[in-house]
Image (cartoon, rainbow, N blue to C red):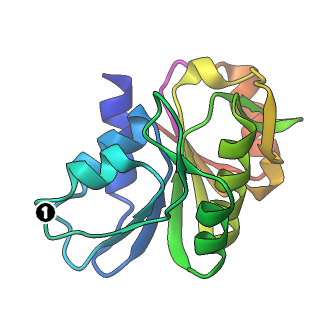
């Protein structure tokens, strides 16, 4: 339920004609479902399952290319990174495994972290979409520091301590 509410809040931020990036994950897949009727929308993704989800919709889908990670449906590696360096987007919606405001955003896969970093570099605005359980956690590989994040969309169970840290880091917070 939290992921569906987070996805709906993310979809409300998307405007017709925009280009958005969605990384792989359950929350970003929910965002893809929530925005499939937005007019003149282009979605860049490294997630083959998101591309399949949008195949019969009016959304234009650009896949990054790359090597398919087993069990995650995501494309990683130099091909994915290089394709992102040649593109520009309005918004990135990024799901993370860990969000420690002092350390940064993390994921368990080194190659996925590199692709996520390239996504953030291609986007004008980075929006983290994650439930409150991800805050205060660290995973293996650093994606980027919290200072690179513009906004976080999360559920209302986020701790007061984490909420305060996000706001002190000048990260806009949307609670759902």
**Vertical comparison of 147 with 6: above or below:** below
As rendered, which of 14 and 176 lies closer to the eye? 14
What residue is pinned by disc 1? 57
Image coordinates of residue 144 in percent, x first then y, are 80, 49
x and y percent of residue 100 in the render?
Answer: 79, 30
Span highlighted in magenta in the image: 153-158
Image quarter (top left, top right, bottom left or bottom right) of the N terminus: top left
Asked which secondary structure carries label 1, the reply is loop
Q: Residue at x 55, y 57 (%)?
A: 66
Is 89 left or right of 37, judged from the image as shown?
right
80 and 176: which is toward the camera: 80
The quadrant where residue 61 appears: bottom left
Q: Quadrant of residue 37?
A: bottom left
- Taking the magenta stretch, the answer to whether it contains residue 154 is yes
Left or right placement of residue 46 versus residue 77 in this view: left
Q: Looking at the picture, how far across and down is residue 88, in whole percent?
A: 56, 80
Q: Within 10 angstroms of label 1, few (less than 14), some, or many (20 or more) residues?
A: some
Task: Label the magenta part by its dominant secondary structure.
Answer: loop
- Is 55 on the left-hand or right-hand side of 15? left
């Amino acid at each position: 339920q939290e992921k569906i509410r987070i996805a709906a809040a993310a979809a409300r931020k998307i405007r017709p004609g925009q280009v958005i990036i969605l990384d792989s994950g359950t929350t970003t897949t929910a965002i893809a479902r929530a925005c499939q009727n937005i007019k003149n929308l282009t979605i860049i993704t490294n997630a083959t399952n998101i591309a399949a989800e949008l195949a019969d919709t009016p959304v234009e889908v650009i896949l990054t290319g790359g090597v398919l990670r087993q069990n995650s449906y995501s494309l990683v590696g130099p091909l994915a990174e290089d394709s992102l360096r040649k593109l520009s987007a309005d918004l990135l919606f990024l799901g993370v495994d860990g969000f420690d405001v002092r350390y940064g955003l993390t994921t368990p896969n080194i190659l996925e972290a590199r692709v996520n970093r390239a996504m953030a570099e291609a986007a004008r605005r980075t929006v983290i979409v994650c439930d409150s359980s991800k805050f205060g956690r660290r995973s293996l590989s650093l994606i980027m520091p919290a200072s690179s994040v513009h906004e976080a969309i999360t559920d209302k169970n986020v701790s007061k301590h984490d909420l305060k840290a996000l706001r002190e880091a000048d990260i806009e917070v949307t609670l759902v």
